[in-house]
Amino acid sequence: DACKLCGKHSLQFEPPVLLCSGMSCGMSRITRNSVYYTDAKNRNNWCDKCYTKLSPTEHIVLDDGSQTKKSRLKFAKNDSLPEEVFLQCHDCKGRVHQICSLYNCRSAKPNEIFRCPKCINVYKDMQGISSEAAPKSSAENLPKCIMSDFIQDGLLKSLDKAYEKTASETGVNIDHVEKAGGISVRVMSHVSLKHVVRDEMYKRYSKHDYPTDFPVHTKCVGLFQSIEGVDVLLFAMYVYEYGHECPAPNRRRVYISYLDSVKYFEPKQYRSIAYQSIIVEYLRFVKKRGFHTAHIWSCPPAPGDEYVFHCHPPQQKVPKEKMLRQWYYSVIDKAKAQGIVVETTDLYEEYFNYRKWGSCGAEIPNPTSLPYFEGDYVPGEIETILSKLNLEDRVAGNKPKSSSDDETSNFGGGVGVGTRRASATAIAIGGGDKVMNRLGMAIQNMKENLIIVRLRNRHFALAVDRGEDVSEWPDDDKYSPEILGSNYGKELDQINKKLSNPTKIGSTIEEDEQFESQMFENRQLFLSYCQGNHCQFDEIRRAKYSTTMVLYQLHNPSAPKFVRQCGACQRDIGNVGSRYQCNVCTDFDLCSDCFPIIKSRSKTHKGSRFVHPKSHTFSLIKCTAINNNINAGVAATISADVRANTLKQFLKVLDHAAYCGGPQTGCQLKNCAKMKQLCVHVKSCPSNMQQCKICARLLSLIIVHARTCTVRDDSCPLPYCKKIRERNERLRHQQRFMDDRRRQAQNAVYQQD
């Protein structure tokens, strides 16, 4: 039967996007109809090439922190075409798509009766139940913060001005102008991390006091709109904020890393205004907090890649390079008209225009002067250039140059890391830094895509890069001091001041509390969540359902990100009905439809999704709800601050215990000995880590620790820290490979020109 709501029969999802977890193939996509190997939960995959290079004895750390071995990986073929699930209404017996009904099986209670939306309305009328109350898992009920309120207020003011303009142009009363309603702006993730300098850059310049990493606050901002009574996520933006405590050259800079949108905003004539206003208000917000420069790399995704949203509407075309660049510059023009932006330039004019530097008598920038942002064009291109230089040295029979014998020995005697430079004459005669020369040639033709947005005047930015004291700098974009101080330490001493002097430029102190959202911590994790759970945005009905699932996850952060999937058909096994669990394999389940096929052994050829060892037996498991109380997520949100502070205290004890010699060294910390015992237990526990509650809790702490652990020689004493960091590095590599693809695609366009 066709769906009662949409009138359609079988509807297929997009074929699953499978990325290899191995490094031999460059973590590339596993092509359709090719063989691969996967873990029991179908979350980590290896192509045939990478599988052969896995060690049969070493443990493999999976993306969720658990471990497995090569022998436990399953043979599979990338030929599945998952379909939308049908549900049968208890009252009318009609069939509806789960997505059309917006039914969340994860929040279902045990033995819950499913009713289609039409029958639900009839049931509520009969029972006298009001349906006007907003659901507790709405976007409006997500936690607010200073930044989200600031951006939302500015967005609403921009829309009000647009309504007035429409009324004036059309000659109608403003009360009769169609307006956008149900708008909510929220910060969906805010975590503190360290962006580690990539290997070749670190090897080349670490001896010149170049930082090993840059502390950063990463945030994800989302725009929701209630459409026909259902929240839809329409816009997402990832930003990196490098505060005053970050070393140069990143100090007091922000990087707009990724943004993506779907075109469902209503009314549609205000869509661009709404999306652009979010960026304008963000720039206004960070300027007030004391950041002096924002950076944007204008680059569309490479063919086949997605930024944030999984599956855009088919009528929404990927913007071409010129169109995207013009869109960004129109945003900047709006910010400039409002006095937020002082001036706009680009990376080439700022750091590679040697004639400008030489004419004013300034010293020429070098690679350590360049802002270094995770995922940006510059770090990836520098790695490529250094790899080529090292190869050229090897071919020529020379030892690859290190920072001590490189051209960078010509660095001048600048007072800060961000100001060491080589002479203009050296550049002119072919000396200077080869990396800068090659990088300059690479970006010269595409310089308009590497946008620098100055929020404060140049004098302030240079003073910050030199490490000078700017704590008394007035909040005046035209201020140009003749004498600059040099006591940068004074600014750091003010870190405990919660609020800045309104007449002075702030110290970028973060006033919003941090909170973790694993799903939104970075672009790749959210995209993986959507791909793994078939949360697509190519239709409005799917966008509504996908947002419903996202909101459920945000309101219930402890709920599993992925529900159990059938090992044969790859469909979700919900909380209603039953499943069949293999008594031999770890986390291998079958749905009630596929179990008879497996049991009959009717499929025997290798590679079939229905092949399973004959000796394995199954147990019938009655499905129960993951979370029977939807209010639990709201309660968890309310206590987010308490949980964050508790986590900090546990991490302090963990870091202390890792290096503490114990009571014999005079340690008097109460929980030190207990934490050491837990670490010993984790190393020797015979149980599966996911089954042992002690191991699971400590492992979650070590996972958080590993995010900021920057020990490069693998000497961190905490158990599994090295393995988890290798896992994290693998995820970073996956992200970097995507960034490299779009960088190479952009390079190819300008090399042709």
Image: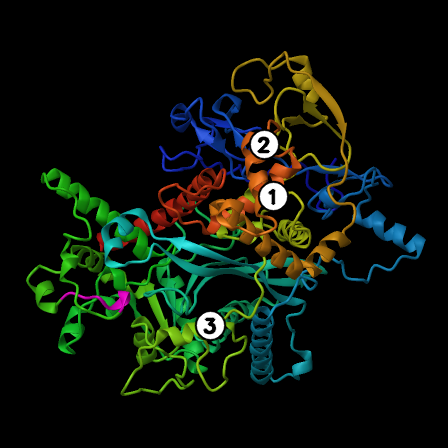
Mark 1 vs mark 2, foreground winner is 1
Determine the CA span between mark 1 and mark 3: 38 Å
Residue 508 is marked as 3
> Nearer the viewer's eye, disc 1 or disc 3?
1
Q: Amino acid at mark 3?
A: Thr
Residue ID for mark 1: 674
- The residue depicted at 41 percent of the width and 75 percent of the height is 491
**Residue drawn at (30%, 75%), measured in percent from left and top?**
462
- Residue 121 position within the rendered picture, expressed as x and y whole percent measured from the top left: 85, 53
- Residue type, label 2: Lys
Which residue corresponds to the image point at 33% horizontal and 59% vertical from the top-left?
A: 372
Pointer 1 and pointer 3: residues touching (CB < 8 Å)?
no
Looking at marks 3 and 2 on the same chain, the residue that comes earlier in the sequence is marked by: 2
Q: Range of the magenta residues?
A: 416-422
Residue named by callout 2: 41
Q: Please tell me whether mark 3 sits on a helix, a strand or a loop.
A: loop
Q: Give the SS element for disc 1.
A: helix
Secondary structure state at the residue bearing disc 2: loop
Question: CA gap, disc 3 to disc 2?
Answer: 42 Å
Labels 3, 2: front one: 3
Q: Quadrant of residue 54?
A: top left
Colour mode of the rendering: rainbow
